Image (cartoon, rainbow, N blue to C red):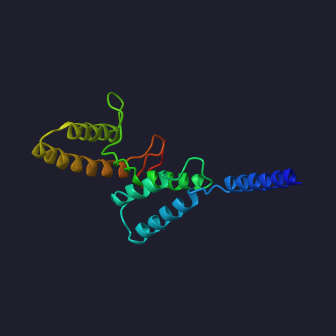
Amino acid sequence: MRIAHRRHSAALLLAGLLALSGCSNDPGPEQLKKAEDRYQELINQNLSAQDPAWTEVSAQFEAVPKDSKARPEAEKRLAALKAAREEIPPRPLARPGATGKGASDVEAKRAACESLAKKMGESRSEPTRKLLRGALDECQAELVKLEANSHPPGEEVHPPGEAAH
């Protein structure tokens, strides 16, 4: 009977150890909660996505263990933070245009503006950049006027009373 009691005690002890190891404490949800609390604080402060405080929050989301059940949510937040921190590409200064024989006035002006924009981008001195910026602004204003008055082939404007041929 004593052997049966030992076996029973050993079985209970083994079952208890297995139960405890099965309930291993996943630190992920707690880490995720802390990171999300800090995330919400920064949102409430209206901090720019470029603010260094967001680096700390990213690190907190990264710290959530890869095998945690909370990791997928942390990954979503990391992706959102990464997207918010990416710089928006600058608007182009000019659009490419056709040049040469048969080019319309609009296409020729567009090509001229593109050339000025390239020169401005390659310029190293601020006075030259300023001068080119002024010329580019003037070129773009002229381009807008040309585009407003130009019509695609077949859509020419005819004065009132004059029929199209």
Whether 118 is drawn above or below 13: the answer is: above
Give the x, y percent position of residue 80: 49, 55
The answer to whether one can see residue 46 in this image is: yes
Q: As drawn, which residue projects farthest toward the bottom?
A: 44
Question: In the image, is 21 to the left or to the right of 39?
Answer: right
Question: In the image, is 115 to the left or to the right of 64?
Answer: left
Q: As drawn, which residue projects farthest toward the top?
A: 101
Q: Residue at x 31, y 52 (%)?
A: 145
Give the x, y percent position of residue 62: 48, 51
User: Residue 111's image quarter?
Assistant: top left
Residue placed most toward the observer, 114 or 35: 35
The answer to whether one can see residue 161 in this image is: no
Give the x, y percent position of residue 45: 38, 71
Residue placed most toward the observer, 149 or 34: 34
Q: Residue at x 38, y 69 (%)?
A: 46
Give the x, y percent position of residue 136: 22, 46
User: Residue 60's image quarter?
Assistant: bottom left
Residue placed most toward the observer, 75 or 81: 75
Residue placed most toward the observer, 44 or 20: 20
Whether 150 is drawn above or below 28: the answer is: above
